[in-house]
Image (cartoon, helix red, strand yellow):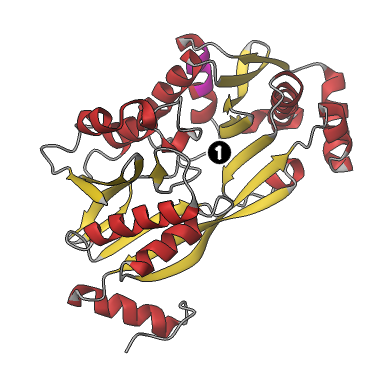
Amino acid sequence: MTDTTLTMTSEYHSNFQSVQAIAGEKLGRSVQKSLFDRIDWLKPLHELCLPDKSPLIVHSKEGEAEAWMFLMKTGLGRHAALANWYNFTFRPIFLGDYDEVTKLALLAKLAKQLKSSSHRIEITPVPDEDSAASLTERAFEQAGWIVFRSKADDNHILNVKGRTFDQYWADRPGQLRNTVRRKAKKNLVSVRIETQFSDEDWNDYVSVYESSWKPEEGNPDFLRKLARHEAAAGCMRLGLAYIDGEPVAAQFWTVENGEALIHKLAHIEDATKTSPGTLLSVAMFQHAIDIDHVDLIDFGTGNDGYKREWMEDVRDRYRLEFYWPNNPLAWLPILRHYLSGLAGKRPPL
């Protein structure tokens, strides 16, 4: 097995062209089905949201099989996932569909490479419905790392299961359905859903977000670029609700490969009596189910109470912490983990 490690220092941190040259289209939309596993996500995320973090991009290869892990430097000998709050998931990326044995070997080789540059690595939010967390944990342990796994967040989802929107809606809580029925009768809120990007529509989205209860947007330029890019691919769904011509609620979704991702939603507090956010959600869910015919709707991370009204299942998102035990800088945090009772195993002799 051969491997290649690409370490991007400060003078190289914004140059993803080398990665693209090696991976080609295998890190693009045609191969990577998840938005968060693509270079078109990772590169702008670094450039616009994490420009002060030097990337450490690790690559292992055996024949045609390849694995990549996109990390960033967070301190001396410390690295973390090249990700932030915009990510629904983070995991090692495979270029191709291989059996578990091959994936484990690729990740173990990748983990061995990392010991020369890092004594502590933390990645989150890692899914496990595809065995990503379990496989990564096993690979790093096989490579000699001490691994701690903990739950990091909840991911609320809706498995459509072939239902129409009306069938899905009939299963929603009675209070939610009654609210929609009463507010819709007043005919005060107008709703539209756009699939093409325009500055005017996006400015309406921004005006709603800035007037909402939401905290200040982490990086508006990143989100705008993402919306424009996904619209060009036919994947953007921008929902806007108006009262008397003024935008009062907005939602930004993407739809692709049978899955709808709810990235952002907001409404203006002064308009809550007319429930524009709820009415807009009805329109967005109906569009995703009856027009886009998605199989799954993903509400991202976070355990907000309102998500339970719309979603039916919850998946765990994990935090994996890796410590290289031969480095003295790792000893104290390893000991703290064991003493805190977070670890499910006895410390090594």
Residue at the far bottom in the pictured view: 349
Residue at the far left in the pictured view: 11
The residue depicted at 46 percent of the width and 24 percent of the height is: 30
Residue 320 visible: no
- Determine which quarter of the picture holds residue 168: top right
The one nearer the camera, 229 or 147, is: 147
- Determine which quarter of the picture holds residue 128: bottom right
Q: Is residue 72 left or right of residue 177?
A: left
- Kindly identify which residue carries mark 1: 213
Residue 296 percent location from the top left of the image:
67, 36
Residue 320 percent location from the top left of the image:
42, 62
Residue 333 percent location from the top left of the image:
30, 75
The residue depicted at 17 percent of the width and 42 percent of the height is: 8
Q: Amino acid at mark 1?
A: Trp
Q: Secondary structure at mark 1?
A: loop
Residue 131 versus residue 94 in the image, above or below: below
Residue 145 versus residue 76 in the image, above or below: below
Based on the picture, tell me whether residue 171 belongs to the magenta stretch. Answer: no
Residue 246 percent location from the top left of the image:
61, 15
- Determine which quarter of the picture holds residue 118: bottom left
Residue range corresponding to the magenta coloring: 201-205
Q: Is residue 211 left or right of residue 267?
A: left
Q: Is residue 95 left or right of residue 77?
A: right
Q: Alpha-carbon neighbours of circle 1 within 10 Å: few (<14), some, or many (≥20)?
A: few
Quadrant (top left/top right/bottom left/bottom right) for the C terminus: bottom left
The residue depicted at 61 percent of the width and 40 percent of the height is: 299
Residue 66 versus residue 333 in the image, above or below: above
The residue depicted at 43 percent of the width and 19 percent of the height is: 229
